[in-house]
Image: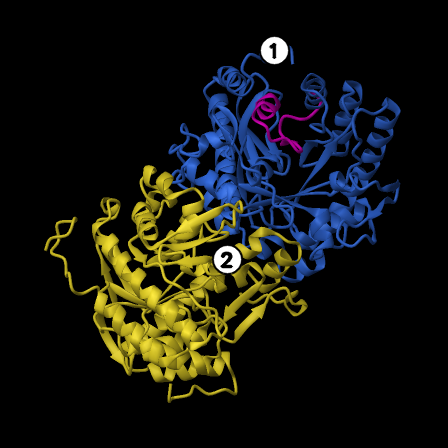
Chain colours: A yellow, B blue
Amino acid sequence: MVDHFGRTAKAALTVEVEATDGRARAGAIHTPRGSIPTPVFMPVGTRAAVKTLDTGDLDRLGPPVVLANTYHLMERPGPEVIARLGGLHRFMGWDGHILTDSGGYQIFSLDPKVTDDGAVFRSVYDGSYVELGPERAVAVQHLLGADIAMVLDVCSALPAETETLRRAMEMTLRWARRCRDHHRNGDTRQHAPGQLQFGIVQGGVDTDLRAESAARTVEIGFDGYAVGGLSVGESRPAMVPALAAATAHLPTDRPRYFMGLGDPIGLVEAVNNGIDMFDCVLPTRLARHGTALTDHGRINLKNLRFADDDRPIDPDFAHPLTERYSRAYVRHLLVTNEPTAGRIITLHNLAWLARLTGRMRDAVMTGEFARLRREIWSRWAPGEQPVDGF
Amino acid sequence: MVDHFGRTAKAALTVEVEATDGRARAGAIHTPRGSIPTPVFMPVGTRAAVKTLDTGDLDRLGPPVVLANTYHLMERPGPEVIARLGGLHRFMGWDGHILTDSGGYQIFSLDPKVTDDGAVFRSVYDGSYVELGPERAVAVQHLLGADIAMVLDVCSALPAETETLRRAMEMTLRWARRCRDHHRNGDTRQHAPGQLQFGIVQGGVDTDLRAESAARTVEIGFDGYAVGGLSVGESRPAMVPALAAATAHLPTDRPRYFMGLGDPIGLVEAVNNGIDMFDCVLPTRLARHGTALTDHGRINLKNLRFADDDRPIDPDFAHPLTERYSRAYVRHLLVTNEPTAGRIITLHNLAWLARLTGRMRDAVMTGEFARLRREIWSRWAPGEQPVDGF
């Protein structure tokens, strides 16, 4: 099989695992566009921009992949507009990878009416009724030209009854099958010939459902697999077994993506359970509210104690884009409501997380992941211990 | 005389006029920090940041000088804090020039009580009473470590009675003398040993007062001269003669700065009357509201007609920081309230204005300034004509 760049495609292999340490993996996801080293944190650019940054900033930060949101772009400016303008990469001016989530998570916060046809809900933009079903979700992502597209799934708020979780899981599986078929055969396919498609495992915190959801999603067969519907407020002792139950049934030669996770301890626990990819709005949202990630935990730079602090945001992390700015300067910009403040902390938080995933990658390569995991726990949850039974 | 870099200072020469074309000048302002090619537009970073940009952006845009505001920085974070942190350049992480205005313009929008001692007014931050007199305005600018400091002046709203304008001019002259003395002898002087200080010409649109104000300010003797209190709502036919009356009495070997001017026709008319330097919040404020400067006038990118427009913001101006972004993309970011929109247009407007002043500089060098002036009029005020009697 020859791909559209004339290369022989490794049709059955989308992730190359270069090293493992326990269940933790370090590798690379191969796509027609290039390779994504893993573990990887994907900055979120919901509406085709990471808030406060432009694409030149992304070039300088260098994340190998950024996220955009199918639902939001479907509403504004519309996928047909983006397709006419040459697709999402050209629209943003971005040569790196783009993963589009399907909109499932957004929709299910909008109190939708859900049938097998899809979801009907009120637009966050103008209150009109919007319909989104599996085929349209796939077609929109084709039109956007994402490198990696997600199936439309049904998310459940937690806690939920087992029966509710099962119904959501079953509908997710039916939709997944239709998404897979439409991904391969839909008439919009030519807009994204090299696009990968990931399935999504659901099942709440029920380990049996998670295992079943994973096994049956793998039966359908996707280029990669995501774990959805976790990190939605459940406790970590509830989350990790559900995650482990899912990953135990996922093939080792496909990427694994934990949706909506961005805190350092969450990341290290997920990698510890074999996850390769993450996204979350948290690091960029926190930044706009003045909170920076550091090797000694979160700090809110609005705090008076930083008014005279000449040190960089994280004294243990000098990054060329932010090392010139003192905590005192950033605090001044925050308390005077200067938009530059959120920008500087956004650059810092994304650079800091890229370093964290890079350190995890290096630690897996050198067999030191367990030590790094303990270090992250001691820095971010001093006094707590990682539960090795996870 | 040897300056603090060990160089022989050209004590009597702060601007080197390299070429003239009519009254228009092209040259360079020499300071202990380096040289500023003129004419030059200075982006405004009121609170030590240009809104939506960080200092890395300024490095990439490359303006030779940016403005900061004495009044605002005096209030937050306070000049003593900035001095302790190593001065404004280190605070911002900026190696280029900084000019600080004196706060006169801000104060006189706050309905101050003015005596010879200075102005008393309500803080825009917390409503408390703030005092600012000539000596304090100088000391604050010393503590900030500006390369170029401005005297504290008394601005009059226009229109105004001649007697009101005269009183403001006389007080500005008394304050100018005290500012000059404190600049040279104040005990904060060691914070800014190489600082230049500019006087400010007042007098409203009264040409006699402008001439008198200029001549008497020159008698005191400054490193450069600003024209203040214009471009405050008066008509262009009223503004230009007042400007010409002032510049006629300014020495040719000192820089001339028109305060608060940023529209293309205003710039070209000011250069036509011998002005070297400008600042204005307009280009950056317009940007945050969606308005871009182009070779065909202002456009508001929120307009529906740009929804499908794949061309760059100004099709006649490709700049490396913004050329990748289509009008359609920027419009999408504007209508969805993404902060990235204001950022992209801010970069564009500042780059566009730098090109405009660069073109004026080149035109003066090649004797084509009159042709460029007509071109700018035809593009920005089609149907109108420059009045050559100005």
Q: Report helix, strand or loop for mark 2.
A: loop
User: Disc 1 designates what residue?
Assistant: B388
Mark 2: amino acid: Leu
A14, B289: nearer the viewer: A14
Q: How many marks?
A: 2
Q: Which mark, by number, is residue B264? A: none
**Dot 2, how many residues are within 10 Å of its Cα: few (below 14), some (14-19), or many (20+)?**
few
Residue B316 is at least partly visible in this image = yes
Q: Considering only vertical position in the picture, is A164 above or below B332?
A: below
Q: Considering only vertical position in the picture, is B70 above or below B156?
A: below
- Which residues, given as a range, are shown in magenta? B248-271
Residue A324 is at least partly visible in this image = no
Q: Quadrant of the C terminus of chain A?
A: bottom left
A274, A57: nearer the viewer: A274
Mark 2, chain letter? Answer: A
Q: Report helix, strand or loop for mark 1.
A: loop
Mark 1: amino acid: Asp
Whether residue B132 sits left or right of residue A233 in the image: it is right
> x, y (%) of residue A262?
44, 68
A10, B381: nearer the viewer: A10
User: Disc 2 designates what residue?
Assistant: A110
Q: Which of pointers 1 and 2 indicates the residue nearer the eye?
A: 2
> x, y (%) of residue B318?
39, 34
